[in-house]
């Protein structure tokens, strides 16, 4: 199983078959949105969505990008894990804290 990256997505392949991906898009300079996370049904329950998310988070951190989570998986991860919230845009951080 190999993690790959191309503009707009990180994806996993197993024997040249795409088995999972997380897609992102540029919102504006310095900000990306995490748009969609997918794992093939036969590979679910193995932590692959988490690996895909971590690859996107590492990429954003390395490139000094802020994130707007659009997909439900990414939203849930940011809600559960305060330690990764530093990657969120300021507005989204305030939203999670209940500020306006």
Image: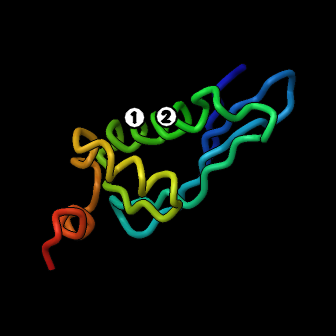
Q: Helix, strand or loop at disc 2?
A: helix
State which quarter of the image contains the N terminus.
Answer: top right
Which residue has dot 1 on it?
58
The residue sitting at the bottom extreme is 100
Residue 68 picture location, percent across and down: 38, 62
> Where is 57 relative to 16, above or below?
below
> Where is 73 relative to 94, above or below?
above
**Side of 95 where 73 appears, left or right:** right
Residue 63 picture location, percent across and down: 35, 42
Q: Label 2 vs label 1: CA separation?
A: 5 Å
Q: Helix, strand or loop at disc 1?
A: helix
Residue 94: quarter of image: bottom left
Label 1: few (<14), some (14–19) or many (≥20) C-alpha neighbours in 10 Å: some
Residue at 55%, 61% (x, y): give it.
Answer: 35
Which residue has dot 2 on it?
55
Residue 24: quarter of image: bottom right
Circle on res. 47: none
> Where is 61 relative to 30, above or below?
above
Q: How many marks?
A: 2
**Side of 69 where 61 appears, left or right:** left
The residue sitting at the left extreme is 99
Label 2: few (<14), some (14–19) or many (≥20) C-alpha neighbours in 10 Å: some
Residue 57 picture location, percent across and down: 40, 40
Residue at 61%, 31% (x, y): give it.
Answer: 48
Q: Foreground residue, 68 or 6?
A: 68
Residue at 60%, 47% (x, y): give it.
Answer: 22
Q: In the rendered structure, are the residues bearing label 2 and label 1 in contact, judged by CB atoms less than 8 Å apart?
A: yes
Q: Foreground residue, 33 or 93?
A: 93
State which quarter of the image contains the C terminus.
Answer: bottom left
């Amino acid at each position: 199983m190999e993690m790959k990256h191309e503009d707009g997505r990180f994806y996993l392949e197993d024997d040249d078959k795409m088995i999972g991906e997380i897609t992102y898009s540029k919102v504006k300079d310095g900000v990306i949105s995490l748009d969609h996370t997918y794992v093939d049904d036969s590979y679910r329950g193995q932590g692959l969505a988490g690996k895909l998310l971590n690859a996107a988070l590492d990429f954003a951190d390395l490139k000094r990008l802020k994130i707007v989570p659009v997909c439900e998986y990414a939203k849930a991860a940011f809600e559960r894990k305060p330690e990764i919230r530093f990657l969120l845009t300021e507005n989204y951080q305030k939203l999670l804290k209940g500020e306006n």
